[in-house]
Amino acid sequence: MAASPMSARRFEDRVLRILSANRVLALATVRPDGWPQVTLVGYIHEGLTLYCSVASGSQKRRNIARDGRVSVAVGRRIGRGDNMQGLSMAAHAEAIDDPDDITRINQLLWEHLPDLDLFAPRAVPATLLRLRPEVISLLDTRHGAAQPVQMSALLMTGG
């Protein structure tokens, strides 16, 4: 029996709960040779938009400068057994250079995670990234997996 379609609002609520319950994501970029490169980074979110920082001189940053398409995975084990809950998304990554945006995102970070460092240059210069999702897929082994949802579908339905 197929599961009934999930409303856009319910889908977005589930995505936001997963994003709020986690703080580390796997970020996959495309290397110059076409192979994927995946690394773990800390993040915060504002709605469905994610923010993270990467070393300015890193391979990951060079990959994104060349091709801003990224894949993200966020998740965790739930309870006992092999139940998992998470999401994956196809997103567009862009560097944030505007000082007002950086200040606003640092305020968001401080409000939600006051024990973390702010997004700012340190010993290794960092670049703040904005990840805007295009497609999001939910995973919840307790209830089956939802179908991927295009962001335009959420916007058109008022999600």
Image (tube, grey):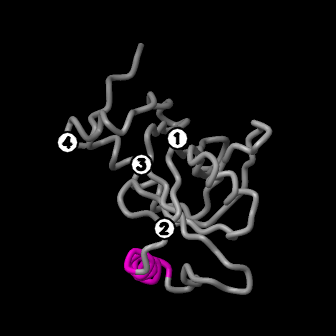
Residue on which disc 4 sits: 158
Q: CA distance from mark 4 to mark 3?
A: 15 Å
Q: Nearer the viewer, residue 38 or 74?
A: 38
Taking the view exactly as shown, the residue that stands out farthest to the top is 1
Going from the N terminus, do you reach mark 2 or mark 4 first? 2
Q: Nearer the viewer, residue 58 or 90?
A: 58
Q: Residue at x 62, y 50 (%)?
A: 77
Going from the N terminus, do you reach mark 4 or mark 3 first? 3
Residue 94 vertical position relative to residue 105 in the rendered view, above or below? above
Amino acid type at circle 4 is: Gly
Residue 72 vertical position relative to residue 129 in the rendered view, above or below? above
Q: CA distance from mark 2 to mark 4?
A: 27 Å
Residue 21 vertical position relative to residue 70 in the rendered view, above or below? below
Assess disc 2: are there few (<14), some (14-19) or many (≥20) residues with their C-alpha within 10 Å of its C-alpha. some
Residue on which disc 3 sits: 15
Instruction: Residue 40 in the image: state x and y as whole percent.
Output: 69, 59
Disc nearest the viewer among 1 and 3:
1
Q: CA distance from mark 1 to mark 2?
A: 19 Å
Instruction: Residue 15 in the image: state x and y as whole percent.
Output: 41, 48
Residue on which disc 1 sits: 90
Residue 29: mark in rendering: none
Disc nearest the viewer among 1 and 2:
2
Quick check: is 105 in the magenta stretch?
yes
For numbered disc 4, what is the local secondary structure?
loop
For numbered disc 1, what is the local secondary structure?
strand
Residue 96: mark in rendering: 2
Magenta-tinted stretch: 100-113
Disc nearest the viewer among 3 and 2:
2
Disc nearest the viewer among 4 and 1:
1
Amino acid type at circle 3 is: Val
